[in-house]
Image (tube, rainbow, N blue to C red):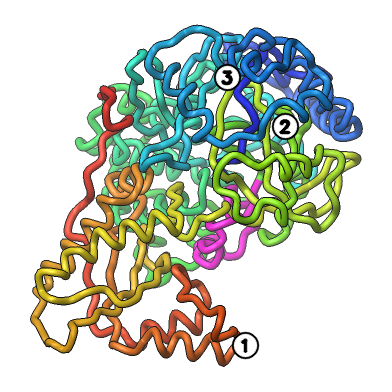
Amino acid sequence: MFGSTLRNSIAINSLAMPKATKHLCHDPKDNLDDDDDGSNTSNNNKSALEYIEEVTSNADVIQEKVLAQILSRSAHAEYLQRHGLDGRTDRNTFKKIMPVVTYEDLKPYIDRIANGDTSPILCSKPISEFLTSSGTSGGERKLMPTIEEELERRSMLYSLLMPVMDQFVPALDKGKGMYFLFTKSEAKTPGGLLARPVLTSYYKSSHFKHRKHDPYTNYTSPNETILCPDSYQSMYSQLLCGLCQNEEVLRVGAVFASGFIRALKFLEKHFVSLCNDIRKGTLDAKINDPLVREAVMKVLKPNPTLADFVEAECMKGSWKGIVTRIWPNTKYVDVIVTGTMSQYIPILDYYSNGLPLVCTMYASSECYFGLNLNPLCDPSEVAYTLIPTMAYFEFLPLDEINGHTNSVSHLVQEQLLDLADVKLGQEYELVVTTYAGTATVFGDILRVAGFKNKAPQFNFVCRKNVVLSIDSDKTDEVELQNAVKSGADHLAQFGASLTEYTSCVDTSTIPGHYVLYWEISTNGHTPTIPSSVFGHCCLAIEESLNSVYRQGRVSESIGPLEIKIVENGTFDKLMDFALSQGASINQYKTPRCVTYAPILDLLNSNVVSSYFSPKCPNWVPGHKDWCSLH
């Protein structure tokens, strides 16, 4: 869900018309502890729903105004001037003059900003920081320039989520949400700007830390536990606070499904220590962050009864329904389960005893896009309504873009459609002109599922070109091929070579991990290849993968890569199977990633040995040549 092809890099300093109502754009300096009675909550919900109704009813008109505002306020930016827009703000001129670009096209401009150039290069407003994308360029995270007021836009979209949810699950303001939220490491560019993930930026902002009291943002986790940079202390303290308030919890979640499952696995591993703390009202000595300790001790009180209850539940043979057993008032699980995260649906159903899995929001590092207005729908039917005030949206018909790898050709550019012109059932790649300049090479593929008034609603189909993903990592076929070659080079000293390979993700273990199936040729010899060599192959592959993957390994959100050696002839059997299913022998190519159960069964039935990476690959915050923050 993170990423979209971007048209240009521009910024403006206010929300597009119509204006969001005051409560949707509150001053972050407002008192966090202000009281909010039921009538205020009801009025705020009504205003939020009216706002959604208004902007979706006037989607095309608003989109035209959004573009005009973006262009007029950045008329003197170097990038727009270079292409000869000359201050014009109409859609026709914009579409005719401005090229559809990729991240690689904009990278020279972005590098100048990162290196300290403060002139108006891509937008008229100063770049406040860089948001690091889960997509990569040259093995490093992409940098998305952003401006300070973009935080207002993100906060506004967050403020729409619970008024929508309240229509389906009322009285959520009577309890708390147990959400596992984390910050990640940040770095500084050579020019001194911060570079960090979008959620880390948001959680560290005054919009989150000093948010006005709202019963819908009443979380079991104190801010200090979320902001703690130590992942163990953060997870432990958030779980402990969630357990202490188990009767008050009405909803649970994390950003990604994988993150919520990791929290439950952490509970499975550390429940004895957690229960000890609850029983005695003391905090484990491993939690040594003073701000975390102070915040947790305000929540933690001796409760032997609760400790015995949690311990008894965790010690039962089955963890089926553990969520509803320990947090009995939970109404739903709030996690992303679209795209590659859908692989976690069965285990979430197991742990939650079939609670609704709710996907509320569609967002990326570049831009926050829209909402799911039917949040209790089946995960396979999730459709996001793009909010037309968030950015200027265009769409490339999928048939027109297959195969392009660089800037979109003029012919394809002419096929661009506006938000109001997409057709039901058709698939498109999203193109975005943002308020703050960012770009990616290829974006998300969306299918039009319906309409809310005049605003289309989209199913998320897939992230283009991605073959493997566990968490926020995205590995494409070219990157996988290059990494596999690096690993296979270790076989040459033994007179062996890699004949064929394919891959899959294994989420039966937590954290999930990449699996490679290798068929090896020994050129008629039968050399003995030490097990350690295959371990070196695994590590060489991991070292060759992008920084997002390597960070995931270091932070233990991704498990060690596994190589499974299969019998000679296995890939011939794979081809035979494909042909038996109707594939053409003239067009058959070995799939580089497989998900189909019968094919996985075939591969696994021919495995003769398996090996894991012996240690984590190298990773440090920031790009290779930057200083890191500790």
Amino acid type, residue under disc 2 in the picture = Leu
Near mark 3 (Cα within 10 A), the count class, few <14, some 14-19 or many ≥20, is some
Identify the mark nearer the N-term, 2 or 3. 2
Alpha carbon of mark 2 to alpha carbon of mark 3: how far?
15 Å
Alpha carbon of mark 2 to alpha carbon of mark 1: how far?
48 Å
Amino acid type, residue under disc 1 in the picture = Gly
Question: In the image, what residue occupies the spot 15% across and 69% down?
Answer: 492
The residue that mark 1 highlights is 582
The residue that mark 3 highlights is 211
Q: Nearer the viewer, mark 2 or mark 3?
A: 2
Q: Magenta span covers which residues? A: 331-359
Q: In this view, does 93 lie above or below 277?
A: above
Question: In the image, what residue occupies the spot 67% across and 31% down?
Answer: 99
Identify the mark nearer the N-term, 2 or 1. 2
Residue 295: x percent and y percent?
Answer: 38, 25
The residue that mark 2 highlights is 160
Residue 418: x percent and y percent?
Answer: 81, 37
Alpha carbon of mark 1 to alpha carbon of mark 3: how far?
58 Å
Side (left or right) of 568 relative to 52: left
- Work out which quarter of the rendered image holds the C terminus and state it: top left
Near mark 2 (Cα within 10 A), the count class, few <14, some 14-19 or many ≥20, is many
Disc tally is 3
Question: In the image, what residue occupies the spot 89% across and 26% down?
Answer: 61
Is 355 one of the magenta-colored residues?
yes
Give whichever of 229, 287 is nearer the camera. Answer: 229
Amino acid type, residue under disc 3 in the picture = Arg
Give whichever of 2, 26 is nearer the camera. Answer: 2
Q: What element carries label 1?
A: loop
Q: Is residue 624 visible?
A: yes
Identify the mark nearer the N-term, 1 or 3. 3
